[in-house]
Image (tube, helix red, strand yellow):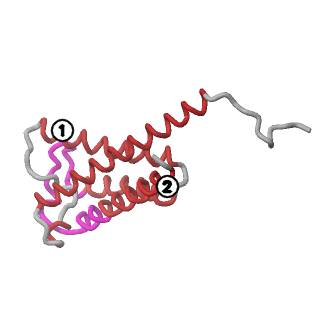
Amino acid sequence: MQPKLIRLFLYSAGALILATAVAKFFSASGSARILQSRDPILMIPLQYVFWIVGGIELAVALVCLLGRRARLQAGLVAWLATNFVVYRLGLLWIGYHGPCRCLGSLTGALHISPETADSIMKVVLVYLLIGSYATLLWQWKRGQNARSTPHRAEPTDVVV
C-alpha cells in the first residue's frame, strides 16, 4: 500500500465517519418517540447513544481529515470499526436480528429503508476494517524492514 493510497483511505474514512456522525446528531436532535427507547446493549436511551457515539465519530473523523500521523489515524479508525463489530456481535448474541439503527431517523428523511441503510453500513464497516488494518499492517512491515536494513552512509552522514 503506497502512501498516496493510505492518505486517500484516511480521507475517505474520515468523510464516511463524519457523515455517520452528522446523521447521528441529526437523529438525536429530533423528537421521535424511538429516541427514548433503550439501546438493547448499552441500556441507555437511543438519543444518548447517538450523542455519545456521534461525538466519538466526530473526533475520529476530524483526526482523519486534519491529522498528519497516519498510524494514529488508522489506529483510531481500526479501534472504532472494531467496536462497531463487537456491538453488532453483541446484538446477535442477545438475539436481535433487525437492522442496525446506526443512522437513526435520517433513513426516513432520505427515503431509504432501514434494511438498505443497514446493508450500506455493513459495507462501510468492512471498508473501514480492511482499510485501517491493512494500513497498520503496511506501516508495521515498513517499520520492520527499516530496522532490519543495515544503515548505509548517505552524503549527509559523511563528516568532512
Q: Residue at x 32, y 63 (%)?
A: 19
As for residue 33 lying within the magenta part, the answer is yes
Q: Secondary structure at mark 1?
A: helix
Distance between the alpha carbons at the discs numbered 1 and 2: 36 Å
Residue sitting nearer the eye, 92 or 13: 13
For the view shown, which residue lies furthest in the right direction?
Answer: 160
Q: Is residue 107 above or below residue 60?
A: below
Q: Residue at x 20, y 67 (%)?
A: 106
Residue 72 in the image: x percent, y percent? 49, 45
Which residue range is magenta in the image?
22-47
> Mark 2 sits on what residue?
4
Q: Is residue 88 magenta?
A: no
Seen from the viewer's position, the closer of residues 59 and 121 is 121
Q: Of the residues shown, which amino acid type is indicated by label 2?
A: Lys
Quadrant that contains the C terminus: top right
User: Residue drawn 32% across and 53% down?
Assistant: 52
The residue identified by callout 1 is 90
